[in-house]
Image (spheres, coloured by chain):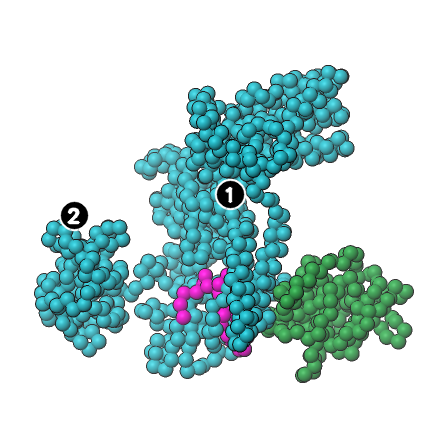
Amino acid sequence: MDDDAEIVAEFLVESHENLDQLDRDLVELERTPDSRELLSSIFRTIHTIKGTSGFLAFNRLEALTHVGENLLSRLRDGKMVMTTRTAGALLTMVDTVRALLEAIEHGAGDADPGVDVESVVSLLERVLAGDVEEPAAVAAEGGEQSTDPQTDSVEDAPPAQAAVEGGEQATVPELESVQDAPPTAAAAPAPEPDPVAEELLEQVLDPVLDPVLDPVLDQAPEDVPAAAEAEEGRRGVVDSSVRVDVDLLDGLVQLVGELVLTRNQILQRTEAADDVELVRASQRLDLVASELQESVMRTRMQPIGQVWSKMPRIVRDLAHQLGREVDLEMDGHDTELDRSLLEALKGPLAHLVRNSLDHGIEPPPARAAAGKPTAGRLLLRAYHESGQVVVEITDDGKGIDPRHIGDVAVRRGVVTREQLARMEPRDVLDLIFRPGFSTAEQVTNVSGRGVGMDVVRTSIERIGGSVDLTSTVGCGTTMRIRIPLTLAIIPALVVGQQGERYAIPQANLVELVRLEGQDLRENVETLAGAPVLRLRGRLLPLVSLSEALGGEKADPDGLTIVVVQADETRFGLCVEEVHDTQEIVVKPIGRQLKSLPTYAGATIMGDGRVALILDVGGIARTRAIGAAHATEPEAQVGTVDSRALLVLEVSQGRRAALPLTAVSRLEEFELGRVERSGGVEVVQYRDGILPLLRLAPAIGLAESPPAEDQISVVVHEDGQHRVGIVIDRVLDVVEEQVVPTEVGRRNGVLGSAVVQDKVTDLVDLDAVVRPLLAGAR
Amino acid sequence: MTVTTLTPTSGGPRTAGTTGQMCTFWVDGLYFGLQVEHVQEVLRYQQLTVVPCAPDAVHGLINLRGQIVTALDLRCRLGLPPRPEGELPMNVIVRSRGEVVSLLVDDIGDVIDTTEVSLQPTPANLPPSVQDVVGGVLPLPGSILLVVDAERAVDVSTPDTTGGTP
């Protein structure tokens, strides 16, 4: 039902738009009656409405458009000539179609007896038969008059905005589906023309409508013509929103951007000022500008549901075409992002969905043979994550086989066999993003024409996003698109190099590292001319910004490294100096510079000078780091070096160490929070109960007296079970290689090792927590 | 900072063949002209932000009332010797294909009316780098005005100093 309601809502919006076009076309046609082009366009529109209404079982609408279509096809084929009468008849048909759509929108279905379809059908039939004398004209006029109030209200109330609140309040049983539908498609969804449901709905509607409408009526302007009551409710809603030209909004964003910059300049100047009034005024300006900026940005935000509302239809059609069975699930409809990004996302998203159906989800027999349900599952998810919007397309199809990809890539000449042999499975999967790559066994209508994933990646990267995929052979594929919330204003780190300033988008930023003297010598090594940094046990390729900008490589005593990430590539960018983080307004750069991969755009700094925005991905590509992944995929799950140890003090200065990978969090609890459950101490922790385990007795040491009113706890998670390990305090994290010895081996202790020149017990965590977890199970 | 709304010129870009009012300027002693329709404004020297790795002719970026404008050095574009140390260039802001570009010139002349003079083809013995940018010449009494083709002058997407664009 949800799906149907959405499809109906979409159909309504689409049809209304089409009808507006139709009105214009018909009037235009009267002026140029021979235009084959216009006639074809009108014919197509009516044909589309007819087709969809048949599909959605709106029989009267279908009957009406069917006759209209007949008339139009004769006109198009030149068997009839366009006259004012014919045009009048067609316009009457359009009005009636509109009236029917209105009725559907109000939830009455197209069986509303208030709309006179039959006389219009007979009028059209008379025109078709060539009987175009007086009676027809009268009927045409009558028809127009009867539908006038409704057409008027349609023009006044754009369908996309009408009935948002009214719909939600009035049709209580449909509340959910209304919320699911995006605002522009929020026309009240019509129930299926099921008589029982309709009756039920009316019963519910009657008592609800009146109290809702009364206050609305009071607010309604006086010149509202006396139309149906529901009409009034809608009017109230329409009044509260205004359609604004997108160009105007873009202009506003531009101006606000300027305002923000000017504010920055003023703030810089007034920081040192003595004039209290000036400082106060500039602070107020700061606040107002920030709020204004936020509000203006919000006007450009739209929910992703707008794109998703098209998906059920696309998926349904594709599934039919490809002989697949697909259950579509969508999650996160109201995730908002910038309008321009939404627009740019449409194409790639449709492409990826198409791919999932064509290449991912198998035909039902193949699925049955693989022991899966015959209907494949396609999940679209959208959510916000660290200032970005993530869109996931997950299918439970056959997954992508790296070997298969590799074979095709070699066959298509994308890579050579030797190159392939050196690639990791993950890189092999990445090959599908190369230009000219398509794996479809046979070129279908849907996909496999060689333009594909590379276009998707390019168009996503153009809007500052990234695409990656994870796939398990036999189980399915997840494509993940990350895009920034908005393009216009982003937080960025400003760095200095050779007297110029450059901005690095915060989205690419991982951390800052400063190395001097001893540390520098120990942690930075040069492998075959390529500098690498040891960072917590991982090797990070280093790129000198100076070199990336075509300058000389400096050899200073200290290194300031900005660790950045683009797609899956992580590297360190060595810069001369780091300034600060700022909100910058991204501005395009001229076409003379578009081909430079190093820059993503430019911005204007507080002092009015221009600074370039670095394209981290572009730098990685030009410095050929993209080819060599800095990390293995596994290492990204836990960025902790498996050898790293958490060194603890447990019993009056005695030292113990836990593998850092086993530690999920460090917490402090007040003693008062410790409660008892059975024989175990517990605390309430994250909506659950965390059993506590005192480490000292568990490894055969005397427990320290509780000195303070707080306890330090190391939270260890094992699947769904959590244990809090009570310790005295955390001493350090060490990453050095320890040599375990058998000395001191006992229950709960694997042995001892010298860590930081002190003997430390290596805790056998499994043995220690086993009794507690066994109790939990 | 005031935001000025710049109304596009009514005539629209004309082809290089038509003449009319010319905005004139000097580069390395040569007298150049650009149809005023193409010229948005003329500015004194503006602080430049250097763009590393950019084509040679790109001298930097300037902030034109919040808009980022690429500044192209006409001396470099024309294959002329670089500007002597200490001499600051002037900006001729040109509209081209919806974008705004600044042409750096040595000095600005008057706006002159050249309706009476007919455009002649560029003499064939001029260096190709100059021919690439110049759409024709106007022999005025006392001087010869080289008419710059704005479209071609701002086209440096391929760093090509020889000017032999086919």
Q: Quadrant of residue A227?
A: top right
Chain containing the residue with disc 2: A
Q: Callout 2: helix, strand or loop? A: loop
Q: Nearer the viewer, residue A171 or A110?
A: A171
In the picture, one chain is green; tell me its letter.
Answer: B
Confirm whether residue A18 shows in the render: no
Residue located at (43% from left, 70% from top): A562
Which stretch did the figure color magenta? A490-512
Q: Which residue is mark 2?
A: A777
**In the image, A227: left or right of A453?**
right
> Dot 2, how many residues are within 10 Å of its Cα: few (below 14), some (14-19), or many (20+)?
few
Q: Which residue is mark 1?
A: A306
Establish whether labels 2 and 1 are both on one chain: yes
Q: Nearer the viewer, residue A172 or A431?
A: A172
Residue located at (21% from left, 52% from top): A689
Dividing the image into 4 quarters, which one contains the N terminus of chain A? top left
